[in-house]
Amino acid sequence: MSDAWAAVERAPAKRLTELFAAEPDRLSRLTVEEGGIRFDFSKTHLTQELLEAFEALADAMQFDRARDALFAGEKVNVTEGRAAEHSAERGHGTPESVERAQAFHARMRSLIDAIEAGAFGPIRHILHIGIGGSALGPDFLVDAIGRDESRYDVAVVSNVDGAALEEAIRRFDATATLVVVASKTFTTTETMLNARSALAWLEEHGVEDPYGRVVALTASPDKAIEFGVDETRILPFSETVGGRYSLWSSIGFPAALALGWDAFESLLEGASTMDRHFRTAPLRENAPVLAAFADRYYANVRGAQTRAVFAYDERLRLLPPYLQQLEMESNGKSVTVGGQPVGRASSQITWGGVGTDAQHAVFQLLHQGTHLVPVEFVAAVEPEHGLEFDHHRQLLINCFAQGAALMTGKQADDPARSYPGDRPSTTILLDSVDPRTLGALIAFYEQRTFANAVLLNINAFDQFGVELGKEMAKAIDSGGFEFDPSTQALIERAFGPAANT
Ligand SMILES: O=P(O)(O)OC[C@H]1O[C@H](O)[C@H](O)[C@@H](O)[C@@H]1O
């Protein structure tokens, strides 16, 4: 394995412009078209030698075996003794896991039909309460494709800060609101507190049976029943679907409700297309794998600590926060599957924003700063808005210009006006932002995250790193625990001297 990494590290480095000049077929070799998306990796430093070295590394890491294990429902999440079966939601998994996912989807669909038929009265507002994987996916989907066509006004509330819930309920009519409580575990403090406050709000505003207005999305139905939700309004999903991989399951309920069942099915079909591609395409023609090769090259050979994702489309503005959880919670680990130190950088820090806004704010550093930041541009050929003039053309022109400028650079006599160039970028160009294409895009990111984990030999499916903070919060909440002087002083300053004794 270390020999395979050594070969990756040894591969000669050339400037991007030299690579284009030397390889006439570079663009076609490093461009993948799949699921209505063009993935252009040609402006990365991937060369023939590097691809060969990475293929050898993938071999050494038993990539094929690991990928088969994922889809075969093996317990790839070793620390929790669980499979990772999010792909089964879109038809790729064991017959049992696919059947189970379909049964849960059917249940979801019947509840949507009932809501549409008026079983809950005239519902206009959906108050979706959840956090992390139980919020970021639904929020992203509804924001991306529910702009014009949403049949309900959806608010996603995650933060425990009461200001978040207050903002949503201020504009909602309680008598026309359905409260959706999304939590895989149904124990998450923020979500439970927000759910209780939402119930109190319904009651205060004349809803006679507030619990009758609650739908629960969870892998722990018993906990939802304990909370007071009727079994008929619980939409379960499998324990083997991880939180940050769960938008395909009943966690996608607000999106399916707002966009319609056909749209939700198209989303799953788009993801299925990408799964098939990931399972069958040769590694050097495989979009998630090529992306992972580039990720590992920049993180582990060139020392890039971050990667930046810019959505050149307002509809995709929630993509960067969605990816932050997917990538950093999955691969921000220090130990291998076997519990040994990883020995090299694991997940990059994912950050980003929206183009063109970001050009006028952070791109200075990308063009002339001292950090190497591989950039990813995500754009769509078709606009959604109906404005005249040149909006969409200008948007895309800017996106393409930035990639070219980062790569080419420009020399000037004045060093302050020089651009070193040779700065890598990937361009992901969608035909349009529709459910099917978005499904393929999100599945691409999931499988890329998994491919990175295999190359690093880490478990992408646990997240113990988030637990200690929760424990400490409980200790502060219950009192009687002596913290360090700094923390103790903050507690006393906020809650008074007796608060934590
Ligand atoms: O869905 P829940 O059980 O409420 O969990 C919500 C979120 O909180 C946890 O702390 C994890 O970091 C996330 O992976 C998870 O998505």
Image: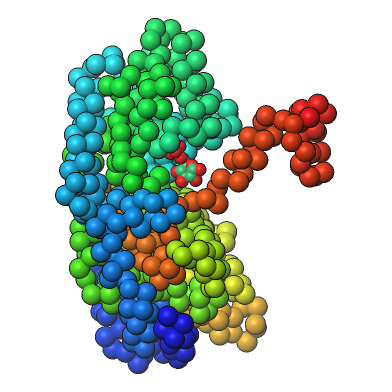
Tell me what residue is drawn at x 77 percent, y 38 percent.
482
Tell me what residue is drawn at x 61 percent, y 40 percent.
471
Residue 405 drawn above or below residue 122 = below
The answer to which of 316 and 208 lies nearer the viewer is: 208
Residue 43 drawn above or below residue 390 = below
Tell me what residue is drawn at x 37 percent, y 33 percent.
220
Q: In which quarter of the image is residue 260?
A: top left
Tell me what residue is drawn at x 47 percent, y 89 percent.
10
Is residue 202 in view?
A: yes
Residue 171 drawn above or below residue 475 = above
In-image side of 45 versus 433 (left or right): right
* Residue 89 percent coordinates (x, y): 24, 46
Q: How is the image coloured?
A: rainbow
Classify the position of the N terminus by image quarter. Answer: bottom left
In-image side of 46 versus 36 (left or right): right
Number of disc labels: 0
The answer to which of 197 and 489 lies nearer the viewer is: 489
* Residue 377 percent coordinates (x, y): 41, 63
Classify the position of the C terminus by image quarter. Answer: top right
* Residue 184 percent coordinates (x, y): 40, 37
Is residue 356 in view?
A: no
Residue 226 drawn above or below residue 254 = above
Q: Quadrant of residue 474?
A: top right
The answer to which of 8 and 73 lies nearer the viewer is: 73
* Residue 333 percent coordinates (x, y): 52, 61
